[in-house]
């Protein structure tokens, strides 16, 4: 099967959706399928190489409100590449400029399309990043939901990673078929580089610390401020604890100032952005005692799946897709309540038995997010759509022949 993937974000950009997509496409190739990825050109694109996967980087410009987001532009070369590749299915990641090109192409050449919904870009958490607050939020939300509905209703099938999101989309009157296929990653067989781990521990003086870990984008919608404020409370009870924030983004300087104002600079580490393979090779997840996120905007964060793979208890905001991920493996709390966060984090750090029980639950739950299962479900969906197209074409030819008679 030939699969054309149109992604508004891909490598060298690092985030959960990208990581999941990389592993998914690699699994497709492993199973003998051909994959072409179309994505915006970004800084560092020339260094991106994935075995067996052809990547076309489109000319791009940075988004005004979010410079890290590159907007891919149409290229004449693209259609000649697509004609030569001759895809059987189009898979769209995101409703941005590249996703729109993918949807247009699928309609133009009559190829079935699958569009993935991975983010609530129309919700207040993201609108704050764009500088839209209080007045005007409701109007902009309504407009963006309408645009999202228009986009996704044009795809043959919408894919989303959680039942919560599926029901939410149906509640906003999305009319197309919506399938739930969970996000997945595959890091368990990656080799641990012990020397790199030692260097990381030494660099940040982590050898005797109880590490609280956050991995993800450092931006306003992730609500990292609550994590920092909760940690300022935790450290009073557990002086040997440290908060490790792995990631980069536009909110970094503001959060560094907050840490300084709270006088906890020595205990809060901003490591910067790390590729997910490096996260595993350096053993970052294995160093931590608990994983945390206070984001209200998550659909099904890959970072939590990764943390569960390595047996970490989770403390997360009681919000959207997170509700389906956290059971006996952690706690769901009010994402804006630093006291509640600190209480649950402290409870885990101070109770070795509880920590062990939650760790076992995380590992067990992580099995539900296997890359093999995700690939299988995607491929079954692709085949179903392709078969439907062939059957309709056959019926059309039959009717045409009868009419001509």
Image (cartoon, rainbow, N blue to C red):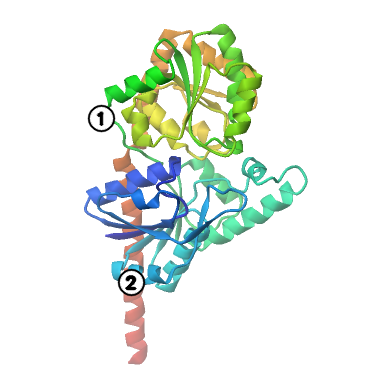
* Residue at image mark 2: 83
Q: Quadrant of the N terminus?
A: bottom left
- In terms of depth relative to the viewer, which is nearer, 89 or 19? 19
* Placement of 196 over or under 146, stated as above or below: above
In the figure, 291 relative to 51: above or below? above
**Image coordinates for residue 217, horizontal then vertical, percent:** 51, 37
Q: Nearer the viewer, mark 1 or mark 2?
A: 1
Q: Which mark is residue 390?
A: none
**Does residue 181 appear in this view?**
no
Q: Position of residue 269 (x, y in %)?
A: 50, 23
- Number of callouts: 2
Instruction: Name the residue located 63 percent from the left edge and 40 percent from the top edge.
Output: 125
Q: Residue at x 36, y 85 (%)?
A: 400
- Give the structural element (helix, strand or loop) at label 2: helix
Q: Residue furthest bottom?
A: 405
User: Real-space Cα distance between discs 1 and 2?
Assistant: 39 Å
Residue 234 location, x and y as percent? 57, 13
What residue lies at 47% left-to-right and 41% top-to-bottom? 162
Outermost residue, right direction? 135
In front of the other: 26 or 159? 26
Residue position for label 1: 191
| Residue 310, picture quadrant | top left
Mark 1, Cα crowd under 10 Å, few <14 / some 14-19 / many 20+, is: few
Q: Are marks 1 and 2 in contact (CB under 8 Å)?
A: no
Residue nearest the observer in this picture, 77 or 222 = 77
Say if 192 sits above or below 24 in the image: above
């Amino acid at each position: 099967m030939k699969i054309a993937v149109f992604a508004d974000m891909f490598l060298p950009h690092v985030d959960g959706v990208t990581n999941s997509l990389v592993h998914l496409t690699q699994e497709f190739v492993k199973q003998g399928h051909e994959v072409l990825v179309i994505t915006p050109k970004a800084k560092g694109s020339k260094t991106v190489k994935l075995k067996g996967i052809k990547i076309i980087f489109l000319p791009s410009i940075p988004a005004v409100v979010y410079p890290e987001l590159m907007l891919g532009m149409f290229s004449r070369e693209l259609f000649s590449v697509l004609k030569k590749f001759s895809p059987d299915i189009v898979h769209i990641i995101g409703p941005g400029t590249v996703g729109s090109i993918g949807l247009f192409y699928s309609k133009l050449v009559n190829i079935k399309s699958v569009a993935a919904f991975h983010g609530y870009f129309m919700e207040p958490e993201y609108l704050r990043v764009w500088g839209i607050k209080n007045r005007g939020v409701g109007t902009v939300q309504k407009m963006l939901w309408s645009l999202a509905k228009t986009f996704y209703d044009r795809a043959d099938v919408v894919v989303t990673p959680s039942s919560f999101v599926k029901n939410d989309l149906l509640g906003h009157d999305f009319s197309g078929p919506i399938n739930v296929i969970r996000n997945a990653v595959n890091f368990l067989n990656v080799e641990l580089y012990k020397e790199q781990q030692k260097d990381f521990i030494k660099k940040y003086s982590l050898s005797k610390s109880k590490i609280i870990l956050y991995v993800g984008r450092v931006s306003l919608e992730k609500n990292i401020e609550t994590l920092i404020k909760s940690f300022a409370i935790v450290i009073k009870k557990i002086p040997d604890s440290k908060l490790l924030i792995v990631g980069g983004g536009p909110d970094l300087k503001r959060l560094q100032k907050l840490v300084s104002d709270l006088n906890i600079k020595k205990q809060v580490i901003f490591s910067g952005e790390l590729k997910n393979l490096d996260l595993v090779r350096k053993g970052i997840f294995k160093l931590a005692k608990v994983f945390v996120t206070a984001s209200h905007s998550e659909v099904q964060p890959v970072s939590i799946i990764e943390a569960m793979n390595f047996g970490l208890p989770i403390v997360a905001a009681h919000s959207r897709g997170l509700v389906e991920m956290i059971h006996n493996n952690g706690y769901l709390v009010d994402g804006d309540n630093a006291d509640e966060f600190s209480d649950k984090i402290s409870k885990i750090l101070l109770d070795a038995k509880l920590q062990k029980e939650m760790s076992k639950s995380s590992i067990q739950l992580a099995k539900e997010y296997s890359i093999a299962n995700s690939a299988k479900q995607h491929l079954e969906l692709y085949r179903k759509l392709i078969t439907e197209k062939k059957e309709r074409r056959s019926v059309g030819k039959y009717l045409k022949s009868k009419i001509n008679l």
